[in-house]
Amino acid sequence: MLFGTTTDREEAFRLLDRAVSHHGVNLLDTAEMYPVPQSAGTHGLSEVILGDWFSARVGRGRVLRREDVVVATKVTGPSGQMPWIRGGPERLDAEAIIEACEGSLARLGLDHVDILQLHWPDRYVPMFGESLYRPGSRYEDRVPLEEQMEALGSLVRQGKVRRVGLSNETPWGLTRCCDLSRYGGFPRIHYLQNSYSLLCRTFDCGGLAECCWEEGVELLAYSPLAMGLLTGKYLPPEGEGADLGGWGPPGARLNLYKGRYSEAESRYERTREVTRAVARYGDLAGRHGMTLTELAVRFVLSNERVGCAVLGATSCSQLDELLDYAGRGALDSRILDEIDGVHRAAPNPTP
């Protein structure tokens, strides 16, 4: 997500080598719109850097085999804010999906991706900070899901995509696509990549958990640390009664790119509700001899429907720490019950 902005090519190579060769990480997730913050000058650099690493490390006579690494990428949905992506993606129709996949393959230097996901729906849904559905905001002209599923099926049949998934999707959208797979002969939906963390449990309480269990869909949980909020680094000394606004390292993402995360993704605004929740989870972690970061990572991986936590790191030491926590296993039921208690008092402050 940050390859090409905060993380340059050299550091990205170090992180990839450390993750794959040392720790055995086998899923690398990117997107055609990355890195963020998005700009015309950096568009596609995350895929290009990952592709350069593949060219240097993976293949005949090299350190890794292609089948050792699962590559996932995402097709940008409709947006009026990124005219540099395919002329400005106005609709997520079949032509756009196929063009996006071809572009990603070219930047990655691969003949196929293992997982192709639709980054967000081609219809109005509350997301990126919204929590209430507003019928008046529905699109008049939206691409039928059947057309999108047929485009994904075409890419699978051509061998350019192995499996397909959705992202930032709702219970209705996921169930409808699964029905199309079952009854319409379209490719099966294997994965859902949605936000999931101590601060965002809409997956648990909004119907998606049931859908994924019944349909056999794995959750790829992104933002398990809620954009760094759950490291505690933005928490002011005054604790839960204070405002997080000006705290944290100046080079940390929410301080470095304040405009993007207060406007484009308002869910990561550092409000008093967020402050209270972060402080309470930090206290809970301390009572059990853990850091807040460990509690956050292990909470996500305690959910049996989670296929993986999509972790991001900007240094090898950070990566080592996160993967060490991930390897410590699920939290016990007593701690999970305490987490539920905090959640009931401060539910989903970053939806």
Image (cartoon, grey):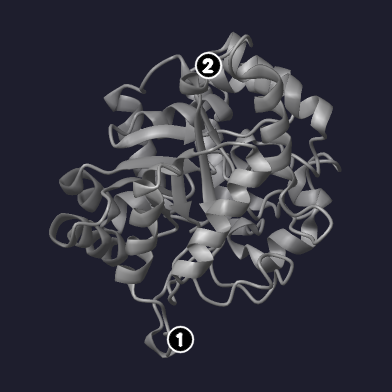
Name the amino acid type tagged 1: Ser
Q: Element type at marker 1?
A: helix
In the drawing, what numbered circle is on residue 20?
none
Figure check: 63 above or below 278: above
Q: Which residue matches tag 1?
A: 137
The x and y percentages for residue 105 are 59, 44
The x and y percentages for residue 201 are 39, 50
The x and y percentages for residue 199 are 49, 48
Name the amino acid type tagged 2: Arg
**Left or right, residue 329 beside residue 96:** left
Figure check: 85 above or below 223: below
Q: Nearer the viewer, residue 3 or 341?
A: 3
Earlier in the chain: of badge 1 and badge 2, it is 2
Q: Nearer the viewer, residue 236 or 323?
A: 323
* Residue 235 can be seen, yes or no: no
CA neighbours of label 1 inside 10 A, class few (<14), some (14 to 19), many (20+): few
Q: Name the residue: 33% across, 62% down.
A: 149
Q: Which residue matches tag 2?
A: 65
Tell me the quarter of the picture where residue 243 sits.
bottom right
| The N terminus: image quadrant | top right
**Left or right, residue 281 beside residue 192:** right
Tell me the quarter of the picture where residue 80 sits.
bottom right
* Residue 332 can be seen, yes or no: yes
Question: Mark 1 and mark 2: span between their CA atoms?
Answer: 47 Å
